[in-house]
Amino acid sequence: MRGGSIIREARKRAGLTQRQLAELLTTTQAVVARWETGKSSPAFDRVVQAVRACGLDLSVRIVNRDDEHSLLIDDALRLAPVERLERLSRSRSALEGLAANVRRRNQDP
């Protein structure tokens, strides 16, 4: 996600206009607009300042990459839409069956 997109999201969540955010950051509305449209790229510390000016905080973390989800997504996208729905229906039925078993076990002394 670009810095400008993060700023726009924070500004919208805070219910601020570009002009209001610009005033909080002691800059101009045009600068905020350029960030949000991607015509210029704010430095990371400026993104953090903008998010905080909106009353929010930005959390960034580095984690180990997990390709498992992307493999599952790629697998699902190879299926036709009707096949994806059938798979989802089977999964739902299996989960409902498991939930029923758990309820039964909890009722039996």
Image (cartoon, rainbow, N blue to C red):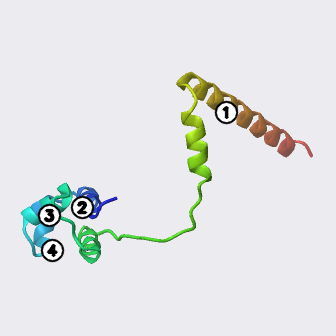
- Residue at 92% x, 46% y: name it: 109
Helix, strand or loop at label 3? It is helix
Are the two marked residues, 3 and 1, in contact with CB atoms closer than 8 angstroms? Answer: no
Specify which label sits upstream in the sequence, 2 or 3. Answer: 2
Specify which label sits upstream in the sequence, 1 or 2. Answer: 2
Are the two marked residues, 2 and 4, in contact with CB atoms closer than 8 angstroms? Answer: no
Residue 84, compared with residue 68, is above or below; it is above
Q: Amino acid at mark 2?
A: Gly
Q: Label 3 to label 1, Cα distance in Å? A: 46 Å
Which residue has dot 2 on it?
4
The dot on residue 92 is 1
Which residue has dot 3 on it?
32
Residue 81 rendering spot, x and y as whole percentages: 53, 25
Helix, strand or loop at label 4? It is loop
Q: Residues within 10 Å of mark 3 (few under 14, many from 20)?
A: many
Residue 60, compared with residue 4, is above or below; it is below
Task: Tell me if 73 is positioned left or right of 60 in this view.
Answer: right
Q: Quadrant of residue 55?
A: bottom left
Specify which label sits upstream in the sequence, 4 or 3. Answer: 4
